[in-house]
Amino acid sequence: MNKLFSFIFLFLIGCMFPSEYRNLYDQKSTAGVILSAFFYSSPFSCSTNANGKSLGNVDQVLLQCNRELASLDTNYLAESNQSIFSNIQFSKIESDRLLITFDPLTDDGRYELVLSGIVSSAGETLLEDKLPIIIDTQIPTVSLNGYIPITDYTFFSTRYWDFTSSEPLANFGPPILSGSLASSVVLRSVQKITETSYRVYFETNFSSNGPGSLTLQFSNSKDNASNLVSNSVTVQFIGLVQGPSLNRGRSEFDAFQNDNGDVIAIYGKNSSAEILRKGATSFVLTNPSLPENLQGERGVMLDGKKLLITGGLPSNTAYTMTASYIFDTETTAFTPTGSMNGGRHLHNIVKLQDGKVIVLGGIRDYAPVGPAYFTSSNTAEIYDPATGNFREITNRMMTPRSFSCSVLLDDGRVLVIGGTDGIFSPKDTTEFFDPTTETFSWGPTLPVPVGALKCMKLLDGNILIYGAQLSNLNNSTMLFDKTRNQIFTIANSKIRREWSIASELPDGGILFYGGAYRYNTSEPSRTIEKLDYGKSNSFFDMGMAKYSVSKHSGVKFSDGTLFFLGGEIGGMFHHETEYYGLIH
């Protein structure tokens, strides 16, 4: 009787409060709470055995409830969840379990099952009618995004890496560093860019400029299912490695590379030739007594095997050479070929698209003692490897030029840049040679007059102009833009780099190695710089070379490794070489 009275009392209290679903046992109502507490020690609930976390190719969830279930309105439940779960179905199993099936989810993340409408046999509704489940079908990985790290060898410089994750991460912490260079890298901060991209700022403090590696492990990073990132990333840093010494000192010369990957050092104020064969550890002196040639000779590879050497200035004479030679880089045979129609040194030489070779301008005669003088030439000749003969072009260059540079353009024309005519008076003019018509025409004007310069065609077809000795004390690095047919100053290097060597890096940047300030080969030229070409177009310090060298040469191997050799230090021949790369 007392129990019945209590029930009636509670029922009357419950009627005083509204309830969802008009259910006396609705636990979201005050009456439902009181009634549930009266009849049961715990509220009506359903949960998964996996604590809300489902692994693998998920397509079903099994709920275990702590009450017997009443009949379910499965259509209502399916409609409540259809916007997130495709083809979802609810099925009652036995008396207290509920099976929910749906099309498999492929995107990891946190989802909510809407369970409003599930009622116990006693009429109770769920206190929490949204059940969170974590779907996890993938293990996250992280990769470097748009970054080639092998050139990022800056000293005391704040930089950053951009990382991309394979899925949204709940947490991305600073990576753990290991490897030979780990102690030289200090991580500063982590910035979240998007749900899957992150930026890590760091500083470097390398004690040497040798190559090394850095491994980044993402143990502090987890996805929404609390899975650790499964991979690591290894960053390779390139640096300078000592190479084999030259047998002879060489300065103001070009080194060559044949199709086999051999490096040929020839002439350069020394009448000899030597070769570093691919894979070898020393140069072999192949021709210790070539025809005498003091300086100013110019050469070009003809067919990947044979090297054409033209002109030059013998010792103790004011008159340049007309003689030319073929050096077979495989057999090391050195044989005369046809002579030029006029003597030249410090001229330009360019291999044309049809395999023929053009020589342009240069100095005809030279007297180094007071008063010094020389006469620049405005003539050009074409060498035909098939006949071994030179033929002088009828048309003349637009102006006499020596100490200039020339480069073959993608369209087959030759661009001739700067130079001088007389005693160290740099020019601001350029001109084109058209091999189809064998005519010359004016090109765009230089923003700065330059002579004794270098030029290099980049991978995008534009022309880099740098290393000018005669430039009115200017640090400008210029670019010929083939699309706009204009030359402009792209950036000013931090240090003047006369007789430097520029090489294109794998990431599109340009490395500048060596060079001197007005023939002063002291400390400043030890600094290596990188031009961030096509991006910020700024110069960055890349550390210090072992030596302060100028008037040297360099080649680039097929794997991207750079090789610098010869030159001068303080007016003395430099016999050593250095690799800049990951190997050797």
Image (cartoon, grey):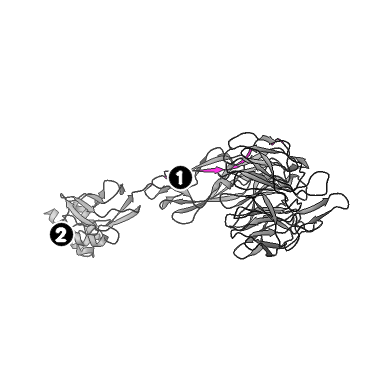
Numbered disc 1: secondary structure: loop
Q: Quadrant of residue 380?
A: bottom right
| Residue 223 location (% of width, % of height) | 40, 49
Write down the residue under mark 2. Answer: 8
The residue positioned farthest toward the left in the image shown: 1
| Residue 36 location (% of width, % of height) | 21, 54
Choose between 118 and 411: the one closer to the eye: 411
Residue 360 versus residue 155 in the image, above or below = below
Residue 484 versus residue 391 in the image, above or below = below
Number of the label disc, if any, that sits on residue 115: none
Residue 446 in view here: no
Picture residue at 26% right of the left edge, 61% below the top: 82
Total marks in image: 2
Where does the magenta region start and end? 226-247
Instruction: Estimate the spatial distance between the alpha carbons at disc 1 and disc 2, rounded to whole Å.
Output: 59 Å
| Residue 477 location (% of width, % of height) | 68, 56
Amino acid type at mark 2? Ile
Choose between 95 and 57: the one closer to the eye: 57
Q: Contact, CB < 8 Å: mark 1 with mark 2?
A: no
Q: Quadrant of residue 228?
A: top left
Amino acid type at mark 1? Asn
Choose between 16 and 388: the one closer to the eye: 388
Write down the residue under mark 1. Answer: 220
Q: Earlier in the sequence, mark 1 or mark 2?
A: 2
Mark 2: give few (<14), some (14-19) or many (20+) Cα within 10 Å: few
As for residue 246 lying within the magenta part, the answer is yes
